[in-house]
Amino acid sequence: MTELQDPVDELLDAYFDYLEGVGEEPSLDHLTSEQRAEAEQLISSLKAAQGMDPEASRPSLAALMAQASARRDAISVESLGANIETALRRSADPRARVAGDVAAQAAGLASALVIYARGLRIRVLVVDEGADIDTAYAASVPSIAAVFGAFPDSNAVLVTNLDPIPLGAIVDRDDVVTAIETPSGRARPPRISRPVLHSPDACAHYVTETMPAFEPFEHLASQRAAMSSADVVDVDHIAAGAVEEIAASGARARLAAKKDSWASLGRPEATLLATALRRALAGEFDETSFRQQVEELVDVA
Amino acid sequence: MSNPPTPRPAARHPLETDSARLESIVDVMWAQIHKVLHRPPPRRRRSGGSDVAGRIGEASTDRVSGNGVSADDVLAEALADLLQKSEADVDTSWEALAVGIARNKAKGALRESEAWLHETENRPRLTVVSADSPGRPDPGGGAAEPLLQVLEDPVDLDDEFTKTSQQLELIRLAQDILDERDRTIFLGLHYETRTRQSLATQFDLTTPGVRHVYRIVAKRLYEHPRFQRYAEGGAP
């Protein structure tokens, strides 16, 4: 005699067949409402469990919070670097850039970023969120000194926090050593000599003060395209000044011949020199011709 | 140049002040990440049935670890993202937001590891249809609404949080109150890490016997007061 199987058992077997890949997903249509309620609970729970691993143990909350904090700091450092780069490009150097300080991190040093602007290199040391910069600086002096020591090409270190509005101060190489203070003559401990500012502003101030922007050398000449270098330079004045200087030197000479010859230089020589200089500026200078003219002047003298 | 602002202490995230709630959220995020990373491929009928492997699915294998991404890393990243959010980002609840972030991070990790596109033969065929084409006919005889209007969010994140919490409680309950045989059978079948045949062999049972044990144990767990509290939407 064949024992009749419970419909929910049959359905469960069919569903496990389906999960094991040997059957189609069974239908619940033939079940009574009571059977259907139980079957639905079982299958719904099996579906909700899909992919879960009962053996997996998750990391502790403390470890996760530490990782989350480190990740937030990394994002904040990246954002700070972008803000500094933008501020420097706007106010100091259109080619300024900020990059991760891979070299310092590889050496186990505390610098997180390197700022390149107008030939300067500023390394960035990040202190705790919300920290007072003066206090944090005092605690970080050894770390900053280590950065200066490891990277002699560093002009300064920015000590900054990662607050929503980051505050920081630029530290010079001289700020991390004990110094003799005037007029007292007493040794003073390291301290920040520059003001605590919004960190991007602190960098921009430092770069502008330390490396003022110079006009390009060709700037004046290039303002008027038609103007040549000879037009810009007062050739007669330069030649007269040079001759006058040599004549004055000759007046102080101890050798009589030198005294006589140098002191006798005057307008003819200045005129010759001005002509030669004018030709040189125009790209027409001929050394042979110049020597010949000088010799003629000597003969006349 | 702007004036230097006044320093202010760093604010704590609202969830950091309620460690019990944060623990339960992190538990669910962890489970959700596993569900995405280890979701079994769509079912295919195998030609044979009796010689299937003792373990099914890939639940115990970290499919993305080959590229240096693990569930631990994804969870850390997802939690960092959650703790970056403010109250203004919460549409329904922190729990739903956490589920959404965990699922998206896990999917992102799968995409980065290129596992997302593996096993193309297992992916369902895609059919492109116009969103303004008519959907299913109205059972009442009315005109069918365009598909665009009947599309629904496929996942209710609050509901997903509750269901996952229940599953986590089932695991804890099974570990707390079941003997070794019942626990192995229930967890093995329920979380698809074992076949009935392999469990039958291990415990000298028939495969219907394994199913019978599973059903009895499942009923016992679902009716347990600890699970009932979860089933009613609360947490012990």
Image (cartoon, rainbow, N blue to C red):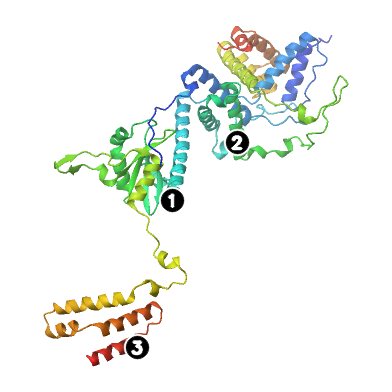
Report if residue B45 is visible in the image. Answer: no
Relative to residue B225, is residue A190 drawn left or right? left
Q: Residue at x 47, y 69 (%)?
A: A225
Q: Residue at x 73, y 11 (%)?
A: A38
User: Which quadrant of the figure has residue A157?
Assistant: top left
Residues at marks 3 and 2 on the same chain: no
How far from the left and from the top, in percent, is residue B103?
Answer: 61, 29
Q: Nearer the viewer, residue A232 or A113?
A: A232
Q: Secondary structure at mark 2?
A: helix
How far from the left and from the top, in percent, is residue A222?
Answer: 44, 67
Q: Nearer the viewer, residue A295 or A160?
A: A295
Q: Residue placed farthest to the bottom in the image?
A: A299
- Tag in front: 2 or 1: 1
Q: Are marks 3 and 2 in contact (CB under 8 Å)?
A: no
Q: Secondary structure at mark 3?
A: helix
Give the CA distance from mark 3 to mark 2.
Answer: 79 Å
Q: Amino acid at mark 3?
A: Ser
Q: Nearer the viewer, residue B66 or A100?
A: A100
Give the CA distance from mark 2 to mark 1.
Answer: 34 Å
Q: Secondary structure at mark 1?
A: loop
Q: Chain of mark 2?
A: B
Q: Residues within 10 Å of mark 1 (few under 14, many from 20)?
A: many
Q: Amino acid at mark 1?
A: Ala
Relative to residue A179, is residue B62 drawn left or right? right
Q: Are marks 1 and 3 in contact (CB under 8 Å)?
A: no
Q: Name the residue that disc number 3 marks.
A: A289
How far from the left and from the top, in percent, is residue A185?
Answer: 14, 42
Q: Name the residue that disc number 2 marks.
A: B108
Residue A96: mark: 1
Q: Residues within 10 Å of mark 2 (few under 14, many from 20)?
A: some
